[in-house]
Amino acid sequence: MKKKQVITGILAASLLVSVPLTPALAGPVKWVNVNVNEEQDGSLFNSENYDFIKYSEIGKKLEEINKQSNRIKIEITGTSSQGYPLYAVTIADPKSQGKFGKIQALRKQMFKNPEKAQDWIAKNPDFKVPIMINGSIHGTEFVGTDAVMQLIERFATQNDAETKEILENNILIFNVVQNPDGRVDATRFNGEGIDLNRDFITQSQPETQQTVELLTEWNPMVFLDTHGYVKNYGPNLQGLIEPCTPPHNPNYEYDLYEDWAMGQAQAMEAEIMADKASFEGNLYQSMEGAYIPLRDDAAGWDDYPPIFTPMYAMYHGAYGHTLEAPTNDEDGVRWMYNAIMGSLKYATENKEAMITDQIEMFKRGINFEHPNHEEGHFPNAYILPVDEKDPTVTEKAVNHLLKNDIEVVQASKAFTAGGQSYPKGTYLVQMNQAKAGLANTMLWDGEDISNDTPAMYDISAWSLPELWGFEANPVHEPVNVVASKVNNITGQGAVSGKGPFLIPNSSVKAIELVNTLLDQGVTVKRDSNGDFYTEAAANKISAAVKTSGLQIGTAKVPADAEAVDSLNVAILKDGGMGKVQSHSGTKLALKRLGFKVTEVTPVEVATTGLTGFDVFVYSGTESLIATNLSAANKEFGFENSGQYATFKANVDAFLSNGGKYIAVGAGASRATKTLGLTDNTINTAGSNSNGIVKVAYEGDSLTAGYDQDDLGFVYRPVWYTGLANDEVSATIADSNDFFVAGHWRNNGNAQGQAVIVKEQDKDVTLIGLEAGFRDHTDYLFRLLSNAIFTK
Ligand SMILES: [Zn+2]
């Protein structure tokens, strides 16, 4: 996102830099359309027909409040995937403006000299603590933003003793509508179909990137994420307030979090209960409290993966809580408002001790002292060597670490570490740094937690080196090397030699380059190793190569290389079955690979067929072709059962006319079987089983660029048996330790079994691995391009 400096008001003194909100609200895009498209009160995602505050009202309402207050600063800190403004509102006591410098100084001290910061706090009890509240990251969980708007109005305009005391002690930062697309469309996900509350380790979406920026600018002491709807999890316990059940991720300093988080949760619950008489719904009449997973349960609501917003915020030192209101109505708003007030009061009462422990987390990082971790859990450093020909993956990783407030340095000389020598230019993440926990959770390999808990809520392994495909070598000894601090890297590609030129099948950027050249009419050939060649002149390809970041050299074109075409790809669209767009990860992967991708709904395939497309990708739930859908899912499937037959006939016709069919994942594999396009047996594991697996790739055209001894990612694992003469291109490794990290119980049946196969007599490819999972498995994206380019 592009930003301009703000010079006036409270935030001038903060580290936030962003676009000021103009009083007329003239600028932002799509404003007129908002009123046409939004307010889907009839949406099945808002079956209560609760009259929430509409997105189009938010800006006007904020501006009204702004006119009555000298405590509020409104900014647009980014835009959603569909172009709607993201509002950040900061509220602070105007008298404190002159003291903001102290807050800044403290923030810097937290990282540079935590002991001094702790001393400073002890001597300056009037310091202000940043507290951040995130409004409705799930679009249909409307009550969060409604409660946020009421709180903004209160803290901007009211003068009661409670309001004043909270403002004397805190700076309140409201991310007002974290998911405008979802609020407008009445969907859980954003306009790209991505669940933003699963996107915090990869940060693929503009909304998540904006929130990460707010978090890294403020390092809030408390972070509250507003959701719905959880009721009756325990008898007469209404709503849910974290902290979570185990397993807790071992990269936290959980001991520093746990007691304060529990105290704060109980304070939120007490605030709700004190107001019990004001709730109107029947549900609330017998309410005895809220469900606090860590207090009320042993398993089932874990905080293990840092894909969730509060769990991610915890790595920036926040006491993070997900708050799930019980109902989608005014009572739900009241519940949320009260919960947040309970937290603000608790944080005000305990701020000195709480912030001392927040700083303690950073101190442990900087001093490389982790008293509650096993020796060696944190390596002294990670070393990230760079591939000279294709540095793009490592560069993406380094930029990602930097955006997440993790320090990266670059060696100015060659050096040796862990018995290995590395050249000048190698990147290093020294682990004696404030946010060592976040660095480790991004760079470690993960662990097999199948036996630690019966089931996990979501993904259980996410190692960026393994799933993005870059090297990050942990070293368990001090690494002393002359190095300089790295800021943002903007790698540029270059062409050398006279050609013909070799484009290696080595990364997403490499495939994107191939597609860019094909779009420009450049002839590109692909050999049996899956690498690409062009005989075009250097000046014809140099601009695209420069953008790609690759270093392209000269090589002879192998005799077996064949020209590839620019292909039109259709992907079957999931409009939101079970409140998820199950195809959206693969769609994003295909776009990032540079393919022209068109979403086609099941009804469109049934009624108009696949004419004009070269490739049809099915990556999503088998329910997309079901004929017995629930009422909530009906609008995303067939309109009548007759459409299944025409869908099938149109797919068959597409295949017999030379079209290519690719199925990705368990749901699509099962659907492919239903459609009669494979006679293999489709075996699937539990729907929440997931993780990183060892995979033996054959290195044929479908798996070019991958090794016999390599990795893959599964979610609801699927494998194929009864293959007859089908070509097998990849199998789960045939060893009993094939499961590297994640949660997958009783996985022995999958050992050594096929996970990528091609039908012998049809152009049907089954990919059992999650080749395009939530923009998360970059390293596996090329399985999609391999399948598309294989003739
Ligand atoms: Zn939610």
Image (cartoon, helix red, strand yellow):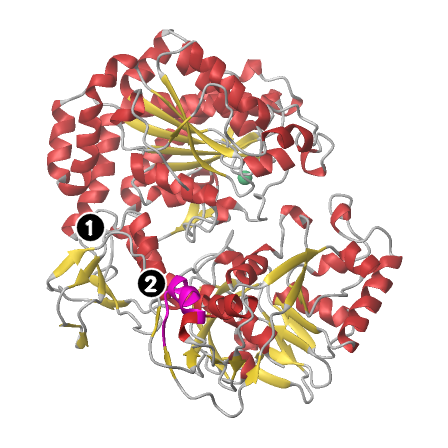
Q: Is residue 80 above or below residue 533?
A: above
Q: Residues within 10 Å of mark 1 (few under 14, many from 20)?
A: many
Instruction: Write the residue at 22% across / 23% down.
Output: 100
- Residue 98 placement (x, y as % from top left): 20, 17
Q: Is 655 on the left or on the right of 474, as rendered?
A: right
Asked if residue 543 is among those painted magenta in the image, a careful observer would answer: yes
The image quarter containing residue 394 is bottom left
Quarter of the image containing the N terminus?
top left
Asked if residue 338 is among those painted magenta in the image, a careful observer would answer: no
Magenta segment main secondary structure: helix
Depth order, front residue of 163/650: 650
What segment is highlighted magenta in the picture? 540-552
- Residue 278 placement (x, y as % from top left): 56, 14
The image quarter containing residue 705 is bottom left
Q: Is residue 456 above or below residue 759?
A: above
Q: Is residue 311 above or below residue 354?
A: below
Circle 2 or circle 1, nearest the eye: 2
Q: Which mark is residue 492?
A: 2
Instruction: Write the residue at 28% across / 47% down.
Output: 405
Depth order, front residue of 593/270: 593
Q: Amino acid at mark 1?
A: Gln
> Is residue 288 in view from this perspective?
no
Q: Residues within 10 Å of mark 2 (few under 14, many from 20)?
A: some
Q: Which mark is residue 433?
A: 1
**Residue extending furthest bottom?**
559
Q: Is 105 on the left or on the right of 570, as rendered?
A: left
Q: Is residue 276 above or below residue 129?
A: above
Q: Is 215 on the left or on the right of 383, as rendered?
A: right
Q: Which mark is residue 371?
A: none
